Image: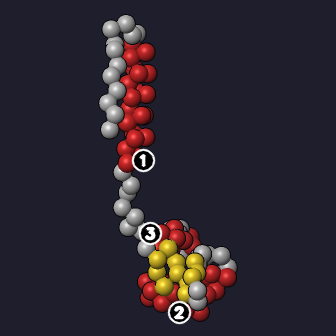
Amino acid sequence: MQVQTIQITQLSPEQFEEAIRKAVRSQLETLKREIHPAKVNEEYLSRKEVAQLLKIELSTLHNWCKKGKLHPFGIGNRVYFLRSDIEKALKPLNSQEL
């Protein structure tokens, strides 16, 4: 990691504050590029696994895909779903909807 030095002998408080902000932004951008969060939710699940996870029938899963509620991925004759997409599709219910 590259270390930046800042000379503060002739800076106004505002210039000093801006220099600190720039340095912090630069460090954050560097960290974002270097540290990749663990992709825990980037797991691919089969149709059967998704149906078991959501406790639904495969026909329901098929209907949700046709309606655009879930977005399947495929390779060959296999169909997969991203776990993160499944979690994003789940919406909190309002008490009025119950």
What residue is disc 1 on?
A: 33
Q: Secondary structure at mark 2?
A: loop
**Lateral position of residue 4 relative to residue 46, left or right:** left
Q: Position of residue 83 (x, y in %)?
A: 46, 73
Image-quadrant location for residue 65:
bottom right
- Residue 71 marker: none
Total numbered labels: 3
C-alpha separation, residue under disc 1 versus residue under disc 2: 41 Å
Sooner in the amino-acid sequence: mark 1 or mark 2: 1
From this view, report whether residue 35 is shown above or below residue 86.
Answer: above
Q: Residue at x 55, y 87 (%)?
A: 78
Residue 10 appears in the figure: yes
Sooner in the amino-acid sequence: mark 2 or mark 3: 3
Residue 60 appears in the figure: no
Image-quadrant location for residue 13:
top left
Give the residue type at disc 1.
Arg
From this view, report whether residue 42 is shown above or below residue 13.
Answer: below
What residue is disc 2 on?
A: 57
C-alpha separation, residue under disc 2 versus residue under disc 3: 23 Å
Furthest-front residue in this view: 2
From this view, report whether residue 34 is shown above or below residue 69.
Answer: above
- Residue 42 marker: 3
Q: Position of residue 97 (x, y in %)?
A: 57, 73
Q: Residue at x 34, y 34 (%)?
A: 2
Q: Residue at x 43, y 21 (%)?
A: 18
Nearest-to-viewer mark from 1 and 3: 1
